[in-house]
Amino acid sequence: MARIQWALFWRILTENPGCCDEIEGRIDSEYTIFGYLREYSECRGGVWKTVRPEKPFWIGDCDAPDGAGFLTAEELVNAPVFGGKSMREVWPLMEIDGAAGMPVEVWMEQMPILGIQYDAARDLYSLPESTE
């Protein structure tokens, strides 16, 4: 399991959303797939442009009883569908087991983003520190 810095996840989600079809993570040892809060341990979601072209960003088993689809990544991460909180708000709680059927470290190695760093002490993948 590892954590992914929000800025890195946002970049992955917006630059290469197809690689986010299935993300496996845990909160307090509760298995999830693209899930973010303990009470949503069975939450499922991802990005399916070919299956759902009208609203490719999707989350199910959340505050929306029949799931919720979104046209953009921005809508997805800001929708208050996790106990009234958004994905962006609960992201610091998320630990990632894997994605697209791969362990998180293999998934990260395949990212077409230069400079991804791994901090073993914090078990955190991140972008290089900005000098701006």
Image: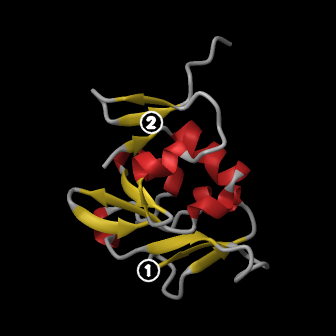
Circles 2 and 1: CB atoms closer than 8 Å: no
Residue 105: x, y in percent? 41, 46
Of residues 47 and 104, the one nearer the viewer is: 104
Q: Residues within 10 Å of mark 1 (few under 14, many from 20)?
A: some
- Determine whether 89 is above or below 5 in the image: below
Horizontal side, residue 42 vs residue 10: left or right: left
**CA gap, disc 2 and disc 1:** 27 Å
Quadrant of the rendered image containing residue 62:
bottom left
Amino acid residing under circle 2 = Tyr
User: Which residue shows up at 68% across the image and 13% down it?
Assistant: 132
Please state which of residues 87 and 34 is positioned toward the viewer in this rendering: 34
Determine whether the residue tagged by mark 1 lies in a helix, strand or loop.
Answer: loop
Q: Residue 16 — which label?
A: none
Q: Quadrant of residue 2?
A: top left
Which secondary structure, mark 2?
A: strand
Q: Which residue is mark 1?
A: 61
Q: Which mark is residue 125?
A: 2
Image x and y of residue 94, in percent:
37, 51
